[in-house]
Image (cartoon, helix red, strand yellow):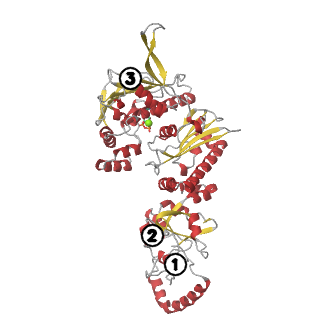
Amino acid sequence: TSQVEQLEFQAETRQLLDLMIHSVYSEKDIFLRELVSNASDALDKLRLEAFQNKELAVDTSDLHIDIDIDKEARTLTVRDNGIGMSRDEVVDLIGTLAKSGTADLRRKLAEAKDSAAPEELIGQFGIGFYSSFIAADKVTLVTRRAGETEATRWESEGEGTYTIETLDEAPQGTSVTLHLKPADTEDHLYDYTAPTKIKQIIKRYSDFIAFPIRMEVEITKPADDESEEVTRQIETETINSMKALWTRSKSDVSDEEYKEFYKHVSHAWDEPLEIIPLKAEGTFEYQALLFIPSQAPYDMFMREAKRGVQLYVKRVFIMDDCEELMPEYLRFVKGVVDAQDLSLNVSREILQQDRQLKLIQRRLVKKILSTVKDMQANNAEKYTTFWSQFGRVLKEGLLSDFDNRDAILGVSSFASTNSTEDQTSLAEYVARMPETQEQIYYVTGESRQLIESSPHMEAFRARGLEVLLLTDPVDEMWVGSVPEFDGKPFQSIAKGEVDLDSEEEKKAAEAEREEQSKEFAELLTWMTSTLSETVKEVRLSSRLVDSPACIVSDEFGFSPTLEKMYRASGQ
Ligand code: ADP
Ligand code: MG
């Protein structure tokens, strides 16, 4: 005697569902990929929990995913015997969109209403479970969490509300039943009640899934050798090959397979920009398959919800986002590392101490940086995409990864006064430096426009000296702590005395300045005392061409931007 409760979707979820149902998303088949991917995750979680919690009495000897087709009822069911969900989890995970509530999503949804690009939005946010509504006009989910007796039934037509109900019993795990939209008789391409169609989708998107994906198929056989008669038999067939992609050699795996695997591990819908398989043999064996995405996730600068590199031990999933494998500044890298010699019982605490993992991390970092370097040298277009998506994050490494600082500087690009469109590498900047120039000039600020109109720029412009224009917040942080590139120190044009002239010019200028100082001595003293509240000193400057005055900081003081940042944060 349980009660059926009706609940409402969150506003964002409702909007998203609305998009999903009404958009003509061209890749309809992907809903099955998403459901199978979730089932596979649930099986991974169960296997792990069973390892770690011996009290949990569950059978993990036959973990699988079943697909059932009911032609008459026009339903398609994906069932797993994985971890399942408690009622609260259903409400939390399914009833509300896991990644919602963010300002960014809300903003994008508002924009999407007017624009014609819902597909892009769907792709960008990777709408997993909800993609069911691409194919279904009603979805029923029944689930029981491992270790619990009560089960939960969830149902929705995707129109703003869902019902939830507690059941006395159900098999452990989760089944998702799609009540398929009316058949489009003209279009057999989308007949999801056809076993061949389902097989084809699974093969294409989910072949590498490590658990058997099974389906009942009808087999017809001749009854015996002589007669024409045939017998029909129902057999259970495993559709996928189940081979872990990272264990196969690169030449055996198609690009298509790598791409689908990327989507599964990253929970993303974009294409990978780079695919990096890697193997270590010897005393400490491991295999890795890493991906650099082509699109930054919307939450790259948010604390929660990050998924980086998964750790496996001998094919068994151990954890998502293994921090020990990838430093923070490479958090956009996705993929798996499968280590042979770790215990399956590893905890986060143990991992933090593990020397071997540190060695793996070092190698992975080097490999990624060298991949970016290759991109930069050999594929400008790819590199530009990479840098525009991930440059801001990568530069964080200049503050934290001293060993690889030069490598990071090497693959970095910056806006500069040399070009209004193209960014420059530091090597290119240095190559353009006139012989007499000894420093790399830069200026930080909020935008190129603001910086370029700053009076600090005048003398440099007048002398044709190139200045790097650093506008990312992180630039302000690293540029003060990284001493040099290629033996050339970084010099802010807004700090201290910038020496722009040759010896002769300097002597002449000094003489002139002395002259002028005498001439303006009274004015300068008067200004210094009048402005004593706000400035330390008023002096004559040689750096201005058109502007009458500018404010500079001490050599060791804060730059104007940093000062602004501190002031804004109330310090
Ligand atoms: P994602 O897989 O990216 O987390 P989804 O929308 O696909 O997003 O799924 C949301 C959440 O619902 C999952 O993270 C998981 O916790 C839960 N979930 C979905 N399907 C299943 C399932 N078959 N078994 C257990 N939990 C599931
Ligand atoms: Mg999912």
Where is residue 237? Give x, y as percent.
48, 21
Q: Label 3 sits on what residue type? A: Ile
Residue for badge 3 = 69
Q: Earlier in the sequence, mark 2 or mark 3?
A: 3
How crowded is the residue under tag 2: few (<14 C-alpha within 10 Å), some, or many (20+)? some
Camera-nearest label, 2 or 3? 3
Q: Amino acid type of disc 1?
A: Arg
Q: Is residue 241 above or below residue 442?
A: above
**Closer-to-camera residue (33/339):** 33
Q: Secondary structure at mark 2?
A: helix
Residue in the image at 48% along x and 48% along y: 294
Residue at image point 53% right, 74% down? 465
Residue at numbered disc 2: 451
Can you identify the residue that label 1 sits on? 463
Q: Secondary structure at mark 1?
A: loop
Q: What numbered label is drawn on residue 327?
A: none
| Mark 1 or mark 2, whichever is nearer to me | 1
The amino acid on which the numbered mark 2 sits, given as a three-letter code, is Ile
Q: Please tell me which of labels 1 and 2 falls first in the chain.
A: 2
In percent of width and height, residue 450 lies at 42, 69
Crowd around label 3: few <14 · some 14–19 · many ≥20 (10 Å): many
Quadrant containing ligand 2 reads: top left
Q: Which residue of the protein is positioned furthest toward the right in this rendering? A: 283
| Residue 7, above or below 428 | above
Report if residue 150 is visible in the image: no
Percent x, y of residue 538: 49, 82
- Tell me the CA gap for discs 1 and 2: 17 Å
* Occupied quadrant, residue 156: top left
Distance from the alpha carbon under mark 3 to that under mark 1: 75 Å
- Marked residue nearer the N-terminal end (3 or 1): 3
